[in-house]
Image (cartoon, rainbow, N blue to C red):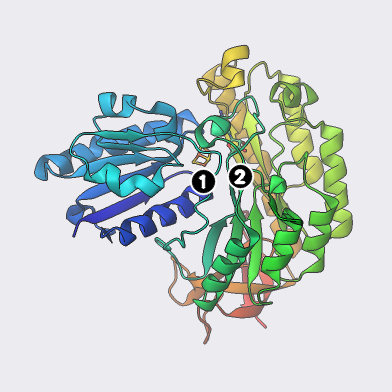
Amino acid sequence: MKNVLIETYGCQMNQADSGIVGKILQDNGFRLTNDEREADVILINTCAVRDNAEKRIHNRVHDLKSLKKRNPLLKIGILGCMAERLKESLIKEDKVDIVAGPDSYRRIHDLINTTEPSVDVELSKEETYEDIVPVEINTDGISAFISIMRGCENFCSYCVVPYTRGRERSRSPKSVVEQAEKLFSEGYRDITLLGQNVNSYFYKEGEQTTNFAQLMAMVAQINPLLRVRFATSHPKDISEELVDTIAKYDNICKYIHLPVQSGSNNMLKTMNRKYTVEDYMKKIEMIRTKIPDCALSTDVIAGFCGETEQDHKQTIDIMKKVGYDSAYMFKYSDRPGTLASKKYKDNIDEKEKVRRLEEIIEVQRELSLQSNKRDIGKVFEVLVEGESKRDARKLYGRTSQNKVVIFDKDNNTKGDYIKVRIDDCTSATLFGKKL
Ligand code: 5AD
Ligand code: SF4
């Protein structure tokens, strides 16, 4: 029996995909391992969204060459977005043995079993893997991801995803609910429904149609002890119906990730985001009115093509205006083949990009600190996720708002819901006492 190690980089969607690959391999006589020394095959599930994500993978493949020297039969495979983007060149340049794009996983065992280097990067309009119940890899037993749709058709000008993950397609609600029920019965308590743009989830069977808000409600009704989250929403499409659904169910987490990318209408236009700052703020007001305790996070890109100092300042303005609880912040990285790469000049020099990014990070650090300070004295229901890595006498868990809380262990364990009063914080963590 061959041992396979699957390494995952990039987004949560990749995490879910690695579980699918793991299941297909198990069903075809392979054994999954975490130990690279006993692996006959190492599959690296990759991200192509920024240049530094790809550099990291090239380095990892290079490092694995020493293992290959010791074990010449070792096969190395590249899966996911970078496989889709770079195709055969990974075999020529990086000397890997297998290249499989995101829609080729049903054949992964065939690709491993051939003697010659093998490539399959065909994209599909239908593949959702909905009949495959993924294995949970590197799991804490509490949190899990369910991919509800694949692909993206938004074509934001900076983004490679529509090219690496292809057309949008949704899984049947029945298969999503069944997977969530199974995870709940196995002890999982926090499930994130995933899609590049969950708002375009849509499934039709005969006369019966299901949209994303309806799917969320179906999963929330499985059990009140199951927390339900989702990622990611596009600001242009987040609907009142979805926000009402989040408000209606206590177990749908009061946390929305709504990537703004920039606070400048000029940049939003060049980015092809299809909303203005004013549209975005209207959505934020709608969320704040309907769900007053909702946490908000965002993605921001610094130094996009043609970004002026004024555009940059407007990004900082919108961050302060919304008062995000957390943010993922990046400097722009040109991706060959995207609209921006073809149409606009990547004209902000590296030093300036870094300066703008650092300024943004500093603003967010202060906003996160203020947000956490506002929680001092409040009581939250915390789902225990595990032992604190720094102190075995403590546990950590998350609030519905997705904030990490550290508190004394007492007699509690993973999977418990406990009430904690917050008494201290940093910009990244809340500290509290069990009530
Ligand atoms: N450069 C920098 N950041 C990018 N993102 C997507 N493409 C790029 C790029 N070319 C960021 C966006 C997106 C997140 C997943 O990654 O902020 O929301
Ligand atoms: Fe990276 Fe985007 Fe692919 Fe996820 S979908 S792995 S973020 S390129």
Front position in the image: 377 or 4: 4
Indicate the secondary structure of the residue bearing disc 1: loop
Q: Which quadrant would the C terminus be assigned to in this image? A: bottom right
Residue at the limit of the structure toward the front, as seen here? 206
Indicate the secondary structure of the residue bearing disc 2: strand
Q: How many marks?
A: 2
Residue 169, label in figure: 2
Task: Answer above or below: position of 425 versus 317.
Answer: below
The structure residue drawn at horizontal position 79% and vertical position 55%, both measured from the top left corner, is: 242
Q: Which amino acid type is shown beneath numbered disc 1? A: Glu
Horizontal and vertical percent position of residue 405: 60, 67
The structure residue drawn at horizontal position 63% and vertical position 80%, both measured from the top left corner, is: 418
Dividing the picture into quadrants, the one containing residue 24 is bottom left
Q: Which amino acid type is shown beneath numbered disc 2? A: Arg
The structure residue drawn at horizontal position 46% and vertical position 62%, both measured from the top left corner, is: 133
Is residue 88 left or right of 155 when viewed as pictured? left
Q: Pointer 1: what residue?
A: 127
Horizontal and vertical percent position of residue 63: 24, 38
Q: Are marks 1 and 2 in contact (CB under 8 Å)?
A: yes
Residue 332, label in figure: none
The answer to which of marks 1 and 2 sits earlier in the sequence is 1
Question: Disc 1 to disc 2, how far (Cα)?
Answer: 8 Å
